[in-house]
Image: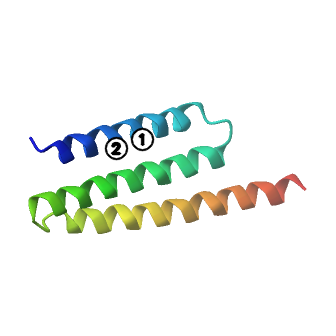
Amino acid sequence: MNPLVIAICIVFGIAALLTLWRIIFGPSILDRAVASDVLLTLVMCTLGADMVINHHTRSLPALLTIAAVGVLGSIAIARFVARRDNSDR
């Protein structure tokens, strides 16, 4: 196995574990939302790195789907938090 692949796996693995920690123990819903966006970004980076290393584009539809889910999820959470903040007043 290529040392570059091992380094990429280690870095993305550590980042994913730290992000999961923030999702589980985050003090607020916004911290958890940001952490879930970071986790989706890490998955996208991993798929992109796999495509670059193995010289293929088979993962491109999955990459685009994950990006769309991340954007729509962020919008939904932002609307939920904004609506909750307005009802507190």
Secondary structure of residue under mark 1: helix
Q: Position of residue 53 (x, y in %)?
A: 14, 58
Neighbourhood count class around disc 2 (C-alpha, 10 Å): few under 14, some 14–19, many 20 upward: some
Above or below: residue 20 compared with residue 76: above
Mark 2 belongs to which amino acid?
Phe
Q: Quadrant of the C terminus?
A: bottom right
Front residue of 87/31: it is 31
Q: Position of residue 65 (x, y in %)?
A: 31, 65
* Res. 34 mark: none
How far, Cα to Cα, is label 2 from label 1?
5 Å
Say which quarter of the image contains residue 7. Answer: top left
Q: Which residue is mark 2?
A: 12
Q: Residue furthest front?
A: 3
Secondary structure of residue under mark 2: helix
Mark 1 belongs to which amino acid?
Ala
Relative side of 56 to 83, left or right: left
Image point (21%, 68%), residue name: 60
